[in-house]
Amino acid sequence: MDKRVSESRTEQVHIITQSDLNGYKRLFGGKLMKWVDIVAAVTARRHCEMNVTTVMIDALEFREPAYANDLVVLVGQVTYTGKSSMEVCVRSYVEGLDGKRRNINKAYVVMVALDENERPAEVPQLIPETDYEKEEWELGKQRYEMRKNRRGGII
C-alpha cells in the first residue's frame, strides 16, 4: 500500500548541553549527524514498516551554528522512493523561546528497507500531495538518477 508523506513525518527535539559542544562551543557536527541519521531511520521505518539501513548521506549542509542551551528540532520526511530505497530529507532548526525556527542544517539520507534476511525489500511508493512535496519528489527523482549513474546502478 502506498503512503503519504505525512504518514511517516518525524520530529525529534534536543536541548544542547555542554557534552554536545566542540572546542568552539558550538554544536559538534558529528553529534548533529548522529541525530540526523536517527531521524532518517525512524522516518524510513515508519514509511516501509521494516528495518532499514543507511546507504549514504547524499548531501549535508551546515548553514549556521547552534550553541549551548539552544533547542534543536529535527524534522524528517520521505521525499522520494525507489524500489527498495527511500530518500529522507532531514531539516534541523534552532527554535527560539518565541517558537520561531531558524534552519541550521539540511541533509538528504538514502535508506534501504531490509527483509527478515537483511536483504533489500520493496517499499511502498510515496504519494506526494502538496506542491512542496511534489517538487521534492521531482528533485528526489533527479538525485536518484544521479546517484544511480555515479554508483553504477547500485541505488
Image: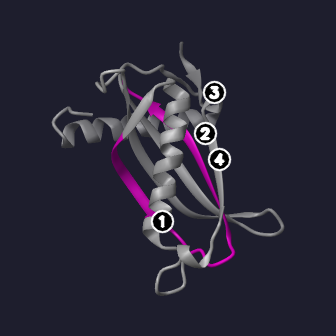
Outermost residue toward the bottom in this view: 24
The residue that disc 2 covers is 132
State which tag comes first along the sequence, 4 or 1. Answer: 4
Label the magenta part by its dominant secondary structure: strand
- Residue at the image point whose x is 39% and y is 54% from the top: 59
Q: Assign a secondary structure to mark 3.
A: loop
Q: CA distance from mark 2 to mark 4?
A: 18 Å
Mark closer to the observer (1, 3): 1
Q: Position of residue 70 (x, y in %)?
A: 68, 72
Q: Are marks 1 and 2 in contact (CB under 8 Å)?
A: no
The residue segment tinted magenta is 54-82
Comparing marks 2 and 4, which lies closer to the viewer? 4
Give the colour scheme shown: one colour
Task: Give, as a three-letter code, the residue at label 2.
Answer: Tyr
- Could you tell whether 4 is left or right of 118 in the image? right
Are the residues at dot 4 and dot 1 in contact (C-beta closer than 8 Å)? Answer: no
Q: Secondary structure at mark 1?
A: helix
Specify whether residue 72 is painted magenta.
yes
Label 1 belongs to which residue?
31
Mark 4 sits on what residue? 11
Q: How many marks?
A: 4
Specify the label residue 129 is tagged with.
Answer: 3
For the residue labelled by badge 2, is the local secondary structure a helix, a strand or a loop? helix
**Which residue type does callout 1 highlight?**
Lys
Q: CA distance from mark 1 to mark 3?
A: 33 Å
